Image: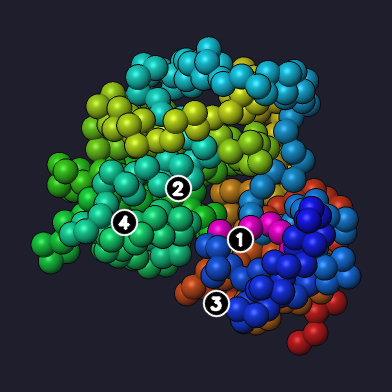
Amino acid sequence: MQISRRNFFRSTLSASAAAGIAVSGLPFSEEAFGEPRRWFLDPALNAFQATDAKGIIWLNSNENSYGPWPSMMPVMREALNYGHRYPRTEYQQLIATIANLHRVKDSQVSLGCGSSEILRVCAEIFTGPGKTLVQASPTFESLGQYSKTRGATVRSVALNSKYEHDLQNMLPQGGEKVGLVYICNPNNPTASISPRKDLEAYIKQLPEDTFVLIDEAYHHFAKSPDYVSFLDQPVNDPRIIVARTFSKVYGLAGMRLGYAVAVEETARKLRAYASFDNVNMVSARVGDAALHDDAGLAAAIKRTADDRDAFLAEVKKRNIACIPTQANFAMIETGKPIRRSIDYFKTKNIIIGRPFPPLTTHARITIGKPEEMKAFWTAWDERKA
């Protein structure tokens, strides 16, 4: 008997209900998936709807709401004609473009299926039984989850009062074997930065066999004079790995493309643990095109900055406490338990960021298009005490 998609999902739902898994018209729990998957269950259809389901406003994953730049679209369409081919010259061309951008050798670049793969690979190489991953709290959770899966100890250190990494408390303690330190800068979910000079002083205090992964996913949005990328000059410290992604400013989250830059020996290790053919034909071509579009990059950065300024003006108008933001999202104080706020906005077809303990009353809001933010603020103003 042929199984239709509708029947498949109905049978899946029945099995889920029998197993005691909650199913409703709201997104599945973040705890089940870590980073929430942007799928939800529509009880009227009894089937899954995808990311851009009509009426849903997605302010939960720090995506670029405007999508890929205009210059990318013809490249993406053309690349589809070669969907039956593995990326061959395209793969190496993208590496060469990245290397040229950062003034390093091709052999210092490792590509990933999103920067998520870079994080997973670092967990594979530098953590494991008997080793510790040191990270901030709160921060992006994936690397911690990967490291726990590897059997490593994960020590999460609270951010300081400025929402910077508390670097002194992130030094090795009590003879622990720190294999890897994770620095997300600007930090997700707080959108705060840790000054470059402080990070450099911290790294100098680390043992020679402790590696540091600096996640610069939100690099392009940071305007603070205290923020300086670790790719501003060629990487020459064998302990430092810098990760970047095309998911944010480039609007290519769905293309799953990221990369790391490190010294040759470290980059060779990363490539050895990466998946074969981890970059597809379309993402390879469009990523290369994006890196050649300086005007598109400048426009995307300005548009985000303008939207962020507009968001912060609304925050100020309502006298809402907000952590200073250097990214395309912001952490605001809701005055309510975050779960209650998440559930409330769902009733308005607005999906906001997941909980980030210990900030139990803060909401991470991705800054979307003006019309999306207008709907958000309307919903905010309609909240009951």
The circle drawn on residue 185 is 2
Front disc: 4 or 1? 4
Instruction: Write down the residue under mark 3.
Output: 360
**Residue shown at the point (59%, 48%) measured from the top left:** 327
Q: Earlier in the sequence, mark 2 or mark 4?
A: 4
Image position, residue 343 (x, y; %): 72, 76
- Tell which of 154 and 9 is nearer to you: 9
Q: Earlier in the sequence, mark 2 or mark 1?
A: 1
- Above or below: residue 329 compared with residue 221: below
Front disc: 1 or 3? 1
- CA–CA distance between discs 2 and 1? 21 Å
Amino acid type at circle 2 is Asn
- CA–CA distance between discs 3 and 2? 22 Å
Amino acid type at circle 4 is Arg
- Tell which of 116 and 369 is nearer to you: 116
Say if the magenta span includes residue 75: no
Q: Earlier in the sequence, mark 4 or mark 3?
A: 4
* Residue 227 shows in this picture: no
Instruction: Write down the residue under mark 4.
Output: 150
Image position, residue 72 (x, y; %): 72, 24
Query: Under tag 2, what secondary structure?
Result: loop
Question: Of all residues shown, which one is farthest toward the bottom?
Answer: 385
Q: Are marks 3 and 2 in contact (CB under 8 Å)?
A: no
- Above or below: residue 336 compared with residue 165: below
**Residue shown at the point (40%, 47%) measured from the top left:** 120
Q: Give the side of residue 243 with respect to residue 130, left or right.
A: right
User: In which quadrant of the rendered view does residue 362 lie?
Assistant: bottom right
Instruction: Write down the residue under mark 1.
Output: 36
